[in-house]
Amino acid sequence: MTTRTFLTRLCAGGLLAASLLLAPLAHAGRSCETKPPGVQSLTRGLALAERTQAALDASGASVVVLARAGQDLGKYQLRYSHLGFAYKQPDGAGGHVWRVLHKLNDCGSAVAAVYRQGLGDFFLDDLWRFEAAWAVPTPDVQSRLLAMLQDTARATALHQRPYSLVSYAWGQTYQQSNQWAIETLAMAVEPGINTRQKAQAWLQFKGYEPTALKLGPLTRLGGRVSAANVAFDDHPNEKRFSDRIETVTVDSVFAWLVRAQLATAPEVLR
């Protein structure tokens, strides 16, 4: 099968979809190189998307918290780099398709936007490891999330454009991709949440614990000087200068969802 035929078949199946906002380059939890993906990478990414769609169909879920491994974060004891919400919707022909709502950083910049894409788009990025993981929320959480995810205005209500890859989990200066997702989940689940501050207060009340990255001063300085999408000035001085960078990671979100009884343990597809 040629790459063109493979792409055509997957597009027809709803694995690829237009994004909310168009940008030449966007990323989250992956490298930001401008080289085009190779045929092998493209084929493997689309195959992973197709297999993930089949697994999600079999799960009976309408919404899942979906993750990918776009970077090697092994030195931080982290397996996944980026998450979004995958949800099922009718395709208008008696069937259904899966869409993914997630936040992506505009490469080389300090801003980000929220995108609505197909599973193919989600896994077409330059992945470090061809692996998918997802947690299935409880039926009540799925119902609340589904209503929000299909309403663009509500789903982006807590989105903040200023972006830092390592934004402080309890700050409002920047907002990285996983942080947007967990704050949006809080707003969907808890009536009355309409600000990031309220969402973070609810997350703390529900026992969410961010990942504490051990980043020394040379690493922090190098990141700030070399990348517009990395900033540390939103972290409290007492934590930043003790090399403790607390940020929202996929692994910490998965662990919290289980601990808070909001979702099942994550399932993995390799």
Image (cartoon, rainbow, N blue to C red):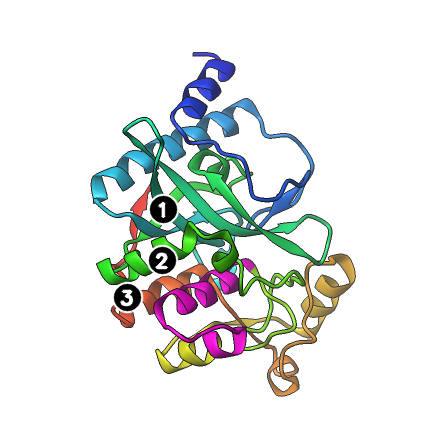
Question: In front here: 239 or 117?
Answer: 117
Tell me: 110 left or right of 53: right
Look at the picture and state if 43 lies above or below 229.
Answer: above
Please report contact status of discs 2 and 3: CB closer than 8 Å, yes or no.
Answer: no
Q: Residue furthest right?
A: 225
Look at the picture and state if 60 lies above or below 153.
Answer: above
Residue plotted at (68% across, 66% down): 219
Q: CA distance from mark 2 to mark 3?
A: 12 Å
The residue range painted magenta reads: 177-199
- Which amino acid type is shown beneath numbered disc 1? Tyr
Which residue is the site of mark 3?
A: 262
Can I make out residue 270 in this image?
Answer: no
Which residue is the site of mark 1?
A: 87
Among numbered discs 3 and 1, the one appearing first in the sequence: 1
Residue plotted at (31% across, 47% down): 268
- Which amino acid type is shown beneath numbered disc 2? Leu
Among numbered discs 2 and 1, the one appearing first in the sequence: 1
Look at the picture and state if 263 lies above or below 44.
Answer: below
Which residue is the site of mark 2?
A: 145
Location of residue 227 by image quarter: bottom right
Among numbered discs 2 and 3, the one appearing first in the sequence: 2
Task: Locate residue 23, reporting x and y percent.
Answer: 67, 41
Query: Principal SS element in the magenta part?
Result: helix
- Which amino acid type is shown beneath numbered disc 3? Leu
Instruction: Give the label, 3 or 1, closer to the camera.
Output: 1
